[in-house]
Image: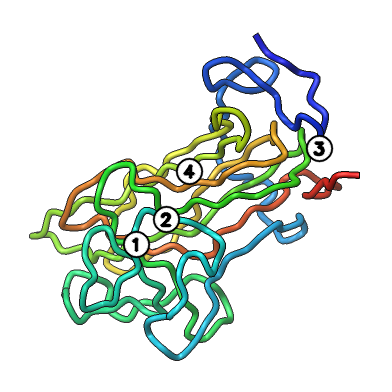
């Protein structure tokens, strides 16, 4: 059964049994809102990781208000389960990566990206809480991802595969929406692609997640940039505040 009488900034929650949502109690798994792929819709946050001349950024995940299971490491100690913020793909320890490839963000010289060396299946790569969403409004949660491994025919590698999830903060963290990238392939030249999902907020407080669907090495190394949550409904505000 479901409770549909949700009042924003009150209970802030629509409850369905067994992690199902909506009027028909089905888990949402919609693609990003490609039909609204423009800059006219309100952005609630947009993480580009900044820019700078130092190849390795001193900031940590907490400086960008997210949590991760990965551990911040210097390049000399970079290994599965590590992360760093870099302004170009490093090459000092491996010839398998796209040496010196740049971030995705436009018009930001020496822009940083989030380099993740995924170690295990279900590693939490990105965990971001956001509050004061408007119940019933459409949102898009997305990021640009790329495999930093080069396409070398004689090398077999694990390709990253990431699951985007949106969960309610209330109650048992019920699943609102999920969508997987599928295997992110290797290319001759590093290629960025947009991934994510759209969802209807059934809670005013949610957690946005990126989780690895696979473990294993060599491979399973990716870069992430331009993480965004935006409104996917015309003429809608993104935040609803108490009072």
The x and y percentages for residue 242 are: 86, 44
In terms of sequence position, does the residue under pointer 1 or pointer 2 come before the other?
A: 2
Relative to 58, does residue 135 appear above or below in the rendering?
Answer: above
In terms of sequence position, does the residue under pointer 4 or pointer 3 come before the other?
A: 3
Q: Secondary structure at mark 2?
A: loop
At a point 74% along the width and 44% down the height, the residue shown is 133
Mark pair 4, 1: CA separation: 15 Å
Q: Secondary structure at mark 4?
A: strand
* Tag 1 residue: 116
At a point 55% along the width and 77% down the height, the residue shown is 50
Q: Secondary structure at mark 3?
A: loop
* Tag 2 residue: 68
Question: Pointer 2: residues within 10 angstroms few (<14), some, or many (20+)?
Answer: some
Relative to 164, does residue 218 appear above or below in the rendering?
Answer: below
- Between 50 and 157, the one lying in front of the other is 50
The x and y percentages for residue 26 are: 58, 20
């Amino acid at each position: 059964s479901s409770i549909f009488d949700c009042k924003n900034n009150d209970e802030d929650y629509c409850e369905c049994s067994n992690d199902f949502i909506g009027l028909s109690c089905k888990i949402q798994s919609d693609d990003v809102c490609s039909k609204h792929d423009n800059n006219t819709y309100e952005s609630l946050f947009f993480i580009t990781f900044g820019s700078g001349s130092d190849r390795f950024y001193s900031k940590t995940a907490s400086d960008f208000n997210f949590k991760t299971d990965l551990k911040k490491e210097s390049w000399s100690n970079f290994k599965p389960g590590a992360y760093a913020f870099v302004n170009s793909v490093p090459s000092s320890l491996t010839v398998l990566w796209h040496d010196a490839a740049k971030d995705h963000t436009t018009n930001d010289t020496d822009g940083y990206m989030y380099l993740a060396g995924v170690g295990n299946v279900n590693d939490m790569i990105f965990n971001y809480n956001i509050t004061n969403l408007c119940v019933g409004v459409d949102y898009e949660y997305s990021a640009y991802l790329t495999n930093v491994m080069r396409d070398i025919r004689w090398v077999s590698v694990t390709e990253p595969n990431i699951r985007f999830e949106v969960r309610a903060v209330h109650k048992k963290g019920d699943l609102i929406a999920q969508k997987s990238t599928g295997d992110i392939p290797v290319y001759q030249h590093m290629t960025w692609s947009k991934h994510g999902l759209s969802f209807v907020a059934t809670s005013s407080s949610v957690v946005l997640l990126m989780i690895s669907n696979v473990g294993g090495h060599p491979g399973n190394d990716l870069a992430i940039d331009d993480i965004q949550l935006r409104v996917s409904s015309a003429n809608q505000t993104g935040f609803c505040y108490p009072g």
